[in-house]
Image: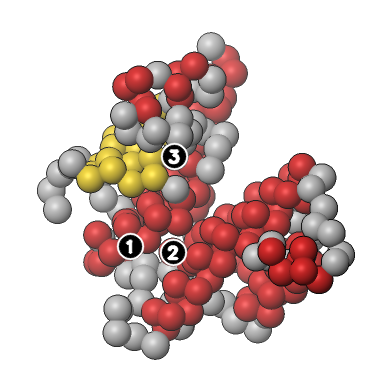
Amino acid sequence: MTDEIVFYTSPMSRGRIVRWMLEEVGRPYRTELVGFGPAMKTEAYRAINPMGKVPALTHGATVVTECAAILAYLADSCPEAGLAPEPTARARGDYYRWLFFCAGPVEAAVTNKALGVTVPDEPRMRGMVGYGSLEAVLDTVEGAVTGRDFVAGDRFSAADLYLAAHLGWGMQFGTIPKRPVFEAYAGRHAARPAAVRAREIDDGLLARQAAS
């Protein structure tokens, strides 16, 4: 596709995950900064994302929101970057599994813990909550990354990017405990050149915002 990629973000948001993915993909893109508060609720921006939040991506006439969806879209739209297993590969199942495990149970469990939301111990109530408990989620993630460089096959994918970004962010701000295997996995992928470039871009934007 030759249509322009436009990335709507704020430098201290989940948009940092998408920035990393865009740097991995390596295609040109334009950044549109959207401030928190009224700027995200304007009619013009809500025409792109009715939820009034970032990140969002437009690719020509295509609009994609939600981090996992954006990552999956970019991986499939830019196959030359090699960020997703082939559709018929056995690793494709693991790729989907861990990409959406992160988008669902990890995101929900960590957010609820940060907000002080506690799932009742009564089994029926736990069964109503897809992630069960934060401990169960983190133990599952630990099992997925222990002794492995990648969660889907033998190369880095968008699933690794998303999981490493969540683990790194959570450990930085104290919403995910610093287990040694998490630190090793997240740290290894955060050292990738594209990840470093993405952080430098967003940190630079933050510094300019603070100085203005």
Q: Position of residue 186 (x, y in %)?
A: 63, 62
Amino acid type of the residue tagged 2 in the rendering: Ala
Element under label 3? loop
| Relative to 130, 75 lies left or right | left
Crowding near the residue tagged with mark 1, few <14, some 14–19, many ≥20 C-alpha atoms within 10 Å? many
Question: Pointers 2 and 1 in contact (CB under 8 A)?
Answer: yes
Seen at 38% across and 52% down, the residue is 70
Name the residue that disc number 2 marks. 158
Q: Residues within 10 Å of mark 2 (few under 14, many from 20)?
A: many
Question: Tag 2's secondary structure?
Answer: helix
- Amino acid type of disc 3? Pro
Tell me if 42 is positioned left or right of 200 in this view.
left
Q: Which of marks 1 and 3 is in front?
A: 3
Q: Which residue is drawn at 62% across and 55% down?
A: 107
At label 1, the amino acid type is Ala
Q: Nearer the viewer, mark 3 or mark 2?
A: 3
Real-space Cα separation, disc 3 to disc 2, in angstroms: 16 Å
SS state under label 1: helix
Q: Is residue 160 above or below residue 119?
A: below
In screen coordinates, is 112 left or right of 189? right
What residue do we see at 34% from left, 85% from top? 89
Asked whether the residues under the numbered discs 3 and 2 touch, taking CB atoms below 8 Å apart as contact, a structural biologist would say: no
Mark 2 → mark 1, Cα distance in angstroms? 7 Å
Dot label at residue 75: 1
Task: Give coordinates of residue 212: x percent, y percent.
Answer: 53, 11
Compared across the picture, whether 164 is left or right of 71 comes to right
For marks 1 and 3, give the CA distance.
Answer: 16 Å
**Mark 3 highlights which residue?**
55
User: Which circle's residue, 3 or 2, is located before the other in the chain?
Assistant: 3
